[in-house]
Image (cartoon, grey):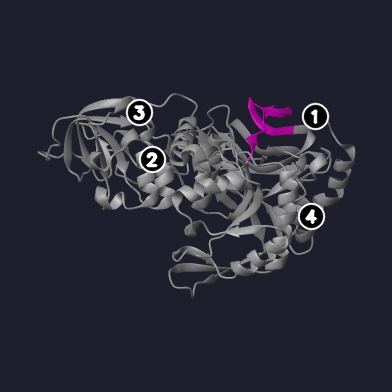
Amino acid sequence: MMLAKCPILWGRCNVVEEALRVVRHRDVFLHHWSIYDRSGRMIEDSGFFRAFPDHASVGGPPRIEPPAAPPCMPEGEVFWLGLFQVHFGHFLVGTLARLWALAQHADAATRIAYVGTAEPDALFGHDHVRLCLEALGVRQEQLVRVEGPMRFPSLTIAEPSFVENFSASPVYGRMMRDIGDRILGEAAAETAPPADLWLSKALITSGNRTIVNEAKLTEALARHGIATVHPERLGFADQLRLWSRTRLAMGFSSSAFHTTAFRGGRQLCTLSNNLAASSNQALIDRVCGNRSLFLHAIDGLREEESTVPGFTVSMVIADPAWMAAELARIADAFRDRRISPQASARVPRRLWTIPSGPAPFGEDMAGQGAVKAQRRNGRITRWQIGWKAVRSVNAITVRDRAGSTQTAALSVQVSGDAVTWNTVSGPDAIEARPDGPHATAFTFRSGYPLPTHFVRIEVMPGSDLDIGEIAVFGERLEPEVGLPDALMHAVLDRRSSNISPAGPVGVLSRARAWIGSLRSRRPTG
């Protein structure tokens, strides 16, 4: 068993630095959850999008046949809220996403149109809904529930500052901080002795997954000085106050961590039930200034068909005492900056138009090392990059301009010295997806971070690939914090004995011998 950093994200993590749009549209109409112009084309900023596996509309098709004579909204100023989701997490990242524009583009007389199943009085019956909307100056009587088809003579639509599992703007972070300050008032400046806290999910009564023996984990955490908090027992304002006395918050991934958006600058350690971390949380962390660590348990969580009413799946912690000790050790190292936070991938240039599966953690390191390329007839046949410092590679993406879909056409290799190379690619580790009408994006994911000095990509003989852009996602491994960050050794130790050396994790076990020499060199570049 071990805890390791999550190498990938569930979704994408794009930060929108450009100014967000606000447009007043004339003579538009509602269909399903989206607004359409007179030609039947969706106004994209009005829609409901998510980005897993791909950025796609779940609020309506891109084009429809315009209705002949739909009912008409009375004249007057109307602002589009969109789909009103009451669920705590979706409310924070979805329902609030367009309301950043209210202050400058609406007044007390503006009606705020939404689609949903609940009437305004029922919505204001939820503590988190009422407090957030009141902090934004929204009164219950301004909300208008609408159903399609309906025509709007005039409708103001703001670009959402948060798109679930896809993108967020710093505007979202500023709006959420303002909401938190208004809810807490003078209490926003209060401080208390900081403590490490575990945010428990034990009292949640329904959902997809439940941790059946989490109570044993929290008992063990208490012996390490980590207190347990049940967010469900706290009012919404008290959940915000909680962050003023939190030094480091840990817990299984949940929307309880989304409330850091109201305070910002927090230290978090979330535990996922698989390799992928929540991109919604990573987006909040990026635009709200959190310092975050996303972990998953290797062989430490067992999944069973749930016998607990209200849940589909039950998760069982294999050894709660061991997990508590590991979490306490990691918490100490993370607070002392001996373990670095994870950075979501930053792509400085546009590589392709269609996102391909889960996003990798880390930055694009392709421009940070020494690159060599061999060509034949003007096309790359071998591409190699080397770094002075050890890197942890989570994913590699190669754009083929010839449009091939043969994953066996590429070979991905890693090396510690550029002499001995280990092949880490295979048919189950490389994915090929269309990238426009005539190109293909190949994505390699190892499933586990690969520590290496060098990466080499070869086009196999007989293939006709025309390689364009290459991105290598990961992070620099500082010798001062271990390889990587005191977590990789556990992966190497565990995987050295029972995984086939032909697999990508087998490369980790074979790499152990040269990792020791890499550490002893203590590279500076």
- Within-10-Å neighbours for mark 1: few <14, some 14–19, many 20+: few
Q: In the rendered view, would you say 108 is above or below 64?
A: above
Query: Which comes sooner in the sequence, label 1 or label 4?
Result: 4
Q: Which residue is mark 3?
A: 103
Mark closer to the observer (3, 1): 3
Q: Which residues are magenta?
A: 362-385
Q: Amino acid at mark 2?
A: Leu
Query: Which comes sooner in the sequence, label 2 or label 3?
Result: 2
Q: Which mark is residue 96?
A: 2
Q: Which residue is mark 4?
A: 509
Seen at 75% across and 59% down, the residue is 495
Q: CA distance from mark 1 to mark 2?
A: 43 Å
**Residue 136 at x, y = what percent?**
37, 36
* CB under 8 Å between discs 3 and 4: no
Q: Which mark is residue 417?
A: none
Secondary structure type for disc 2: loop
Query: Which comes sooner in the sequence, label 1 or label 2?
Result: 2
* CB under 8 Å between discs 3 and 1: no
Query: Which comes sooner in the sequence, label 3 or label 4?
Result: 3
Mark closer to the observer (4, 2): 2
Q: Amino acid at mark 4?
A: Ser
Q: Amino acid at mark 3?
A: Ala
Secondary structure type for disc 4: helix
Q: Is residue 412 found inside the magenta-colored segment of the image?
A: no
Q: Quadrant of residue 216?
A: bottom right
Q: Which residue is mark 1?
A: 525
Query: Which comes sooner in the sequence, label 3 or label 1?
Result: 3
Q: Main secondary structure of the magenta part?
A: strand
Query: Which comes sooner in the sequence, label 4 or label 2?
Result: 2
Q: CA distance from mark 3 to mark 1?
A: 48 Å
Q: CA distance from mark 2 to mark 3?
A: 13 Å
